[in-house]
Image: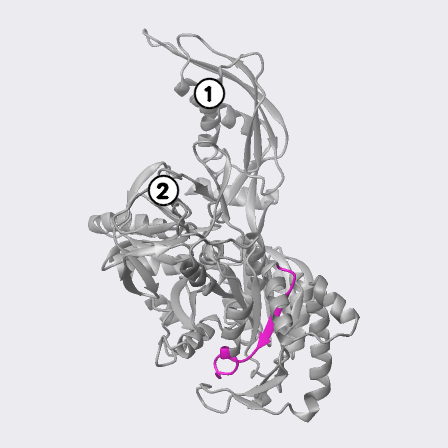
Amino acid sequence: MPVQITSPSDGERLRRLRNIGIIAHIDAGKTTTTERILYYSGRTYRMGNVDEGTTVTDWMVQERERGITIQSAAITSEWRGYQINLIDTPGHIDFTAEVQRSLRVLDGGVVVFDAVAGVEPQSETVWRQANRYGVPRICFVNKMDRTGADFWRTVDMIRDRLGAHPVAIQIPIGSEDQFAGMVDLMNGKAWAFPEALGTNPQEIPIPDDLAQQVKESRDLMIERIAETSEALTTKFLEAEEITEEELRAALRTATITGQLVPVLCGTALRTKGVQLLLDAVVDYLPSPLDIPAVRGTNPDTAMEEERPPDPTAPVSGLVFKIQTDPYIGRLAYVRIYSGVMQTGQMLQNSTRDRKERIGRLVQIYADKRNEVSELRAGDIGAIVSVKQTFTGETLCDPIAPIVLEPIDFPDPVISVAVEPKTKADQDKLANAMQRLAEEDPTFRVKVDTDTGQTLISGMGELHLEVLVDRMQREFGVQAHVGRHQVAYRETILRKTEVEMRFVRQTGGRGQYAHVIVQFEPLPRGGGFEFVDKVVGGAIPREYISPTAHGIRDALENGVLGGYPIVDVRATLVGGSYHEVDSSDMAFRIAGSMALREGVEKAQPALLEPVMRVEVVAPETSTGDVIGDLVARRGQISGLEMHSLGMQAVKGHIPLAEMFGYATNLRSTTQGRGTFTMEFDHYEVVPEERARQILGMVARR
């Protein structure tokens, strides 16, 4: 239900606020679209170019060198008197955490599609993430000027591959090199963009050859929109005229509730259609007042509570990103859901139950900052120099504590060993890794207890390459980097029961713990479950939790190769204790020992990450591509036409077999092939292959 605000001025401010993100597959044109939005809204006076490295949002050295977005960048702009807080997100799957944390705090999204490629693998991933957080979306079919561009094919793919309900509210005038503009089906006006910068769209007559298609498309649009409104359904069935205002209001409601997804078209690079996209953002995407009040848990009562986007309510905000700025220190990006956050205020980090003083507050403009005295409900900004708050944690009024839903991030699937060259580099490396781990929740650091090596883990080869580059440039670390290693896991394949006693007598007070634990496998992706089935007080309640902690501790190092153990349920069914000698530590140790013995008895197995892969290659090379993937232990799941003369091969392939694949694909397809991959699931490694892997681990 829409939220009611008591103050008229605050209500109007919130009504005119849009918190949106630009999300898409890599190379669909997100950053170029963002640059055009900034130019047309008056925030910049020169259009940035990705290829020239002059964009506002891709400000990192690594982003400008590679021509890709690595970190999400926040921008505040204005259009038609509406404030638009916009976040440009990465498209590469290795940086999916940036997309997830942005979607968690946004009210709406613009999903950009390449008109030639249509719905691509990462498009599906970001769409699922937006579904999970309930983010209303509009679609922008970009690159309509490219050879092979097909607006209607892309609309069909949005329906078929994403399970969405797209409704075209524009149709293109021409395509490929004949693309001239679009017809707005809401008012029947045709628009062209004769100027090189596209600054002043020009209304033109609808081309004669499009008149019939415009009529049919508009009738279909009206029917789709009318189906979402009882009042309009009645009008439609009785053949009454439905006004443009009624259509816009009904489409806005349908978009916010997820019933429909408006689809627009254009070419951001050639400056056609971006102003109409901005109009659609204002007209159809929600303000903070249009979405349900955020919900969370009161840490004192464990009861669910909500916070409306009202500045008079108790303050609450979610920190969704940590960034280290070389000039002003540690920045915490925050979305304010309720109340007013002010400089000098003492707030509670309810996730950690710690106090945090708010120093300076800033509004973000990519890598630039604008200092402000307060952030109000609905705002997105940053806090300078927070010390004890991290990504996904809640800051709130100590008198009215609430813990908002945190952000879940995927586990890393690939690692490399990093060895500092000198003692000075070792100290720098430790500092760099701490800073980077605070910024990036998908970056993990682990010291191998057997070899003493420092292992850094991430979401893919590019992710680790960028992290190592940042260590060298930003933190001055000189280090040797090893070969990529797969992040294997261990699990069990059958059920077993273990009885474990931990007894130590040392002359004084001893240690005693006795536990009986059943271990059984969970489905893939099940993680770890602990179940307490102790009856009759065989183990006092205060020792149950230490036992669970002990089992969790032991999950970190498996019995086969020292890899983390996953997909296991541990059920504590019995045991005994000693009134004097039993302690938390004794039961923690007993739990840890029980886990190791249980795993050894329950047929331990090695798991490897399997990636969902899509290879786009010329039709003439498809056979060679499929043969190569099968030779890499791949399972082909589908083959479909991608664009003119190109086919998409889909399948699942173990990550271990995909290292160096880009070079191989270039050779196979004379440089025309491309591929994308993302983590899909873990799978048991074949026995012979597992022996080879574990043999290499033993030799290390």
Q: Is residue 642 magenta?
A: no
Residue 399, picture quadrant: top left
Asked which secondary structure carries label 1, the reply is: helix
The residue that mark 2 highlights is: 397
Residue denoted by label 1: 590
Residue closer to the observer: 200 or 139: 200
Residue 83 at x, y percent in the picture: 42, 67
Label 2 element class: loop
Q: Is residue 75 above or below residue 305?
A: below
* Label tally: 2
Looking at the image, can residue 267 be seen? yes
The residues colored magenta run: 258-275
Is residue 489 placed above or below 101 in the rendered structure? above
> Alpha carbon of mark 1 to alpha carbon of mark 2: how far?
41 Å
Question: Residue drawn at (54%, 65%), measured in percent from left and top?
Answer: 285
Few, some or many C-alpha atoms within 10 Å of disc 1 (few <14, some 14-19, many ≥20)? many
> Which residue is found at the position 35% from the left and 38% from the top?
398
Q: Nearer the viewer, mark 1 or mark 2?
A: 2
Q: Main secondary structure of the magenta part?
A: loop
Tag 2: residue type?
Answer: Asp
Locate residue 173, reporting x and y percent. 62, 86
| Residue 266 falls inside the magenta stretch | yes
- Identify the coloring: one colour
Can residue 622 be seen?
no
Question: Is 346 or 277 nearer to us in this picture?
Answer: 346
